[in-house]
Image (tube, rainbow, N blue to C red):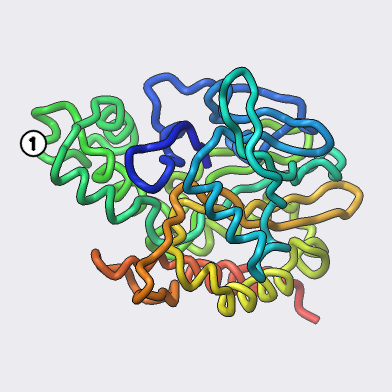
Amino acid sequence: VLTSSLTQHHSCDTHQGVYPNIIHVMYIEILQLSYVCLILLVFTGSFHVGDYGTLLKRFCEGEQQCYLRLMEDSLRPFVPAYHGVVQRDEQDYNMMDNLLTHFNTPAIMDCKMGTRTYLEEELVIARERPQPRKDMYEKMVAVDPEAPTVQERAQQAVLKTRYMQWRETLSSTTTLGFRIEGFRKADEECHTNFKRTKSREQVIEALDNFVDSNTTILVSGTFSEPRLKQLRQVLEASDFFKSHEVVGSSLLFVHDWTGSTGVWMIDFGKTAALPSHLMLDHRTPWEEGNREDGYLWGLDNLIDILSNMLPLT
């Protein structure tokens, strides 16, 4: 969910903030929380709260192009409204709606969608210009000391793509096509320990915790299972969605004590336009070269899980 700066290629690395040597943890007033603050992992200056219910996110050309297209697409109601580029302290920012403005002490959750969180071009770059990372090696062995290969152990470093692929095998990204990045309930600390949340049962337990076992939230409102089915229907017909590889994007879920709820698509720093001859169905299993991202397969599974959580009538 983080965007730091433009890369030399066509995307912004929305994961740079997740794996730095030093992670800046910022506890911010809940009413000023941006999506990224859901997991409380932010780089100073990446986000600012703007005026009149807006959010300023550090400029990414790829994300800007996505929002410009989305404002003309059937998906517009499901993404933050985009208001162009502004400058603050000589830094450009994409300005968009702050989706939390109209909530009262909200609970927020980030679900990373799809079966992979890296672009195919990142694999090519890693092969052509490998840059082993010591910090990612340390993160790997902290979770599983047996995970590194003999070569990685000798180097005390791993490639970023290798780390990301390994991390995905631990979570529901590979088994369900989405994973819970983290959530924060109203007036509580943030919950981010979902690296090994992999099975349907574990995901259900986490979702039940997020809604405090209040299945009414799942039955009605814009957070609900019917709302996600509506999103799926719009996605299947969207010209934008068919023509883009959607990697590293999330669904942001919000609810508060007044009963207000919402769900939006966010984070398009790694969303890439496809060649004109190629269109994705977002369900076909990924093989390098086919550009499939598994987004709809993950949404299918998420909807099915929420349906099974509904009370019997």
Q: Secondary structure at mark 1?
A: helix
* 11 left or right of 289 in image: right
* 155 left or right of 307 in image: left
| Along the line of sight, the residue nearer the viewer: 203 or 54 | 54
Image vertical order of residue 313 relative to residue 274, above or below = below
Q: Position of residue 312 (x, y in %)?
A: 76, 78
Residue 213 position by quadrant: bottom right
Which residue is painted at 46% across and 51% down in the image?
A: 248
| Along the line of sight, the residue nearer the viewer: 155 or 99 | 99
Q: Position of residue 133 (x, y in %)?
A: 24, 29
Q: Amino acid at mark 1?
A: Gln
Q: Position of residue 212 (x, y in %)?
A: 75, 51
Report crowding for label 1: few under 14, some 14 to 19, many 20 or more residues within 10 A (C-alpha): few
Position of the C terminus, as image quadrant, is bottom right
Which residue is painted at 37% across and 37% down in the image?
A: 7
Q: Residue furthest right?
A: 258
Which residue is painted at 88% across and 54% down in the image?
A: 259
* 52 left or right of 202 in image: right
Which residue is painted at 44% across and 72% down in the image?
A: 282
* 111 left or right of 22 in image: right
Disc 1: which residue: 151
Q: Position of residue 129 (x, y in %)?
A: 15, 38
